[in-house]
Amino acid sequence: MARVYNFSAGPSCLPEEVLKECAAEMLDCNGTGQSVMEMSHRSSAFEPIIQDAEAMVRKLMNVPDNYKVLFVQGGGSTQFAMVAENLGIKNKKAAYIETGVWAKKAAAEAKKLGVAVDVIASSKDKNYSYIPKVEKISGNYDYAYICFNNTIMGTHYEYIPDTGDIPLVADISSCVLSEPLDVSKFGLLFAGAQKNLAPAGVTLVIIREDLIPEPEACLPGTPTMLAYKTHADNGSMYNTPPCYTIYVLDKVLHWIEKNGGAEGMLKRNKEKADYLYNFLDSSDFYHATTEKGSRSLMNVPFLTKYSDHAADDEAAAAKEKAVNDKFVKEATAAGLVNLKGHRLVGGMRASIYNAMTLDGVKALVEFMKKFAANN
Ligand SMILES: *Cc1c(COP(=O)(O)O)cnc(C)c1O
């Protein structure tokens, strides 16, 4: 079976070079006679791997010295709670910008833990198809929270809100290292690895040191594992880390470095996204669902002309669904997989993370042209 072009939103495609290296080292990593899967995390064979992964994050993201780089588990979803438990502790009040599912879930989790949530802006009025412009955030908030790239809706911030002294928290799960980012503008950044960095299993957290509370100062009842201090004090090895995922992550980071670092990724990603959006914007058959000025370079949802019908027109809705299903089925047969759209947006979605090639995007556009001509 030839390899396919995988447009999955996550877990998603990884650089082929990295997969080949992993395969070559599966039975014997660095002359140890073991797979990384089998190594003790406290061994002299594994420790350099996690140390290098941290050093590579610092280097590629230009992380200032007063920030900790942590590898934790539980995915982006656990961060929704961890952020509130560790940062929502003084005034127990936080500002959230609502840009779709992931931001809403984060706000709901904070509320559940007793943090008062102010939704200071929302793009709900247009089904989250744009990013609200919030120049300045002020008030007695413990933190302000944004989802920097909205994986489901396909939107992305083209600015960083000015929060003054309020720590800015950003979920960068689906755009980490897809572009340069000024870490010093944020109090905390987190990213589940399975979108742009590695297989599922590890979450990267970058947090300014002065924001890490003593475990006792976290919200009452915060488990040991959910206090950032636990991980910060133990080099992310308080308990067994997801060793193999961190090993792959380290390899992906070296691949990013070889390909020009964050700047190189931005160039590569802009080229791919421009190619796809230019096609969508010039097509009579397809259209992007997001507004210009808020578009993600990573996740591109799109609809067909059959989506333009009255909400209560059942026959037209059935036709729309049939066309979408046919698109996904025929694309799959052509080696272009995981293009089904999220149910909240409908249509199709192409996720074109760092590892997706321009050739993959060109193959998709060629297929889309043929499909439009035949339907
Ligand atoms: C996928 C995703 C999440 C959830 O990540 P899990 O690791 O599945 O918990 C959170 N935020 C964003 C932006 C995502 O894309």
Image (spheres, rainbow, N blue to C red):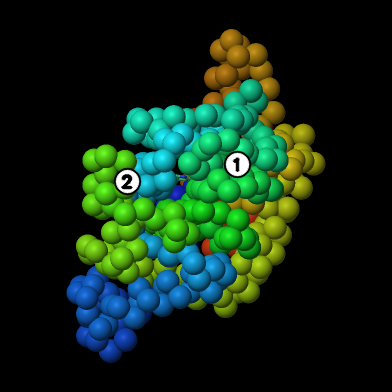
2 vs 1, front mark? 2
Ligand 1's image quarter is top left
Tell which residue pokes out farthest to the right in this image: 282
Count the labels in the image: 2
Of residues 342 and 102, the one nearer the viewer is 102
SS assignment at label 2: loop
Residue 62 image point, x, y percent: 57, 70
Image x and y of residue 57, in percent: 48, 69
Quick one: 66 or 263, which is closer to the camera? Answer: 66
Q: Residue at x 72, y 53 (%)?
A: 275
In the displayed structure image, the side of residue 233 where residue 178 appears, left or right: right
Image position of 44 with respect to 107: above or below = below
**On the rendered image, what quadrant is the C terminus found in?**
top right
Q: Is residue 81 above or below residue 204?
A: above
Asked whether mark 2 lies closer than 8 Å to ligand 1, one says no
Task: From the viewer's perspective, tell me whether residue 16 is left or right of residue 130.
Answer: left
Q: Give how far across and how far down residue 257 sits, in percent.
A: 56, 75
The three-letter code of the residue at mark 1 reads Gly
For residue 287, above or below residue 334: above
Quarter of the rendering occupied by the N terminus: bottom left
User: Can you tell which quarter of the image residue 362 is in?
Assistant: bottom right
Q: Residue at x 74, y 43 (%)?
A: 293
For label 1, the residue is 154
Badge 1 residue CB within 8 Å of ligand 1:
no
Q: Secondary structure at mark 1?
A: loop
Give me the residue at 39% from left, 41% from top: 89
84 horizontally vs 267: left or right:
left
The disc labelled 2 sits on which kind of residue? Cys
Residue 192 x %, y %: 42, 53
Tag shown at residue 218? 2
Whether residue 224 is visible here, answered yes or no, is yes
Residue that lies at the very extreme toward the bottom in this rendered image: 31
